[in-house]
Amino acid sequence: MKHLLTLTLTLICAINLAQAQVAAKSRNLKKDFDTLGDNQEVVERVRNLDTQQKVRIVQNRLVDRNNRVEVGMNYSYLGSGDSYVKTQNGGAMLEYHINPHWSVGAQHQKSFNSLTSEATAVYDRVQSCQAAGPGCTEKFPALDYPVQSTIATISYYPIYGKLNLFDAAVAHFDLYTSLGYGQIQLLSGTTNLTTAALGVGTWLSSRVTTRLEVRYHRYQDLLLTDKRQQSQVLAQASLGILIW
């Protein structure tokens, strides 16, 4: 009986010690996992400990942007500027990625303009006044609007991140800022253009990216005698493809 009691106590101690070791091992593995370590062996061991838990590792960059060339197309809508003209732009871009943090590029856009409801009302009023007789003193307002623009840009990508979208996919994205200089052709002539932008680019695959950005344009209005500076804010969307 004494030997049986001793054997039972020894077995109980061994079981408790084994359980404590497994629990400590599980805590250490899950601690490693919480740091987003990229050790695949750690991931497999965690999966073996908890088969009900989904494990995703998002460490390495999806896209190598060292010495890469990107081409694309863009669309922008002018959110401020002349209250008489609505402007939309469509164009193409070329980007050379020096490394994941810096790129230089060029963009060309053609503008498509139309009158706002305010401008239409003013034109209708002036036209009715002039049709009424020679005594009308109202005149059509002078309008100046963009025709096309070409700029060279330099961009900096300080933040790179990843998002788990409903456990369906991992989205890789960059936050970036950009500065540019070039020329804009207006109805009245051509003038210098400076620009700055803040945006986010999301990689749909290892070659395809989309960008959404807010862009600021500043140039000199040539139509007015006081040569005032015009400031415009545009919302721009782009689709790019790495070709090399």
Image (cartoon, helix red, strand yellow):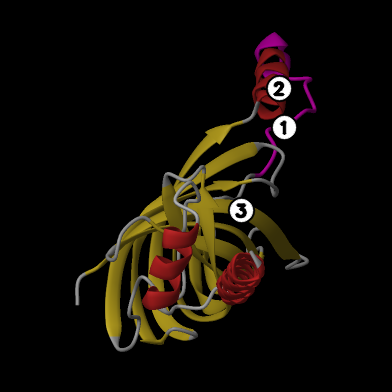
The quadrant in which residue 7 appears is bottom right
- Mark 2 to mark 3 CA distance (whole Å): 31 Å
- Mark 1 to mark 3 CA distance (whole Å): 30 Å
The answer to which of 58 and 172 lies nearer the viewer is 58
Q: Is residue 132 above or below residue 86?
A: above
Q: Earlier in the sequence, mark 2 or mark 1?
A: 2
Q: Does any portion of residue 80 appear in the rendered image? A: yes
Q: Which residue is mark 3?
A: 234
Residue 71, position in %: x, y?
Answer: 28, 67
For residue 180, side relative to residue 59 (left or right): right
Residue at 46 percent of width and 56 percent of height: 171
The quadrant in which residue 87 appears is top right
Residue at 29 percent of width and 65 percent of height: 206
Looking at this rendering, what residue extends furthest in the front direction? 1
Residue at 36 percent of width and 70 percent of height: 62
How many marks on residues? 3
Residue at 48 percent of width and 60 percent of height: 49
* Residue type marked 3: Leu
Circle 2/circle 1 CB separation < 8 Å: yes
Looking at this rendering, what residue extends furthest in the left direction? 244
For residue 137, side relative to residue 106 (left or right): right
Q: Which residue is mark 2?
A: 126
- Mark 2 to mark 1 CA distance (whole Å): 6 Å
Residue 60, position in %: x, y?
Answer: 41, 77
* Quadrant (top left, top right, bottom left, bottom right) of the N terminus: bottom right
Q: Earlier in the sequence, mark 2 or mark 3?
A: 2
Residue 139 falls inside the magenta stretch: yes
The answer to which of 48 and 132 lies nearer the viewer is 48
Q: Which residue is mark 1?
A: 139
The quadrant in which residue 216 appears is bottom right
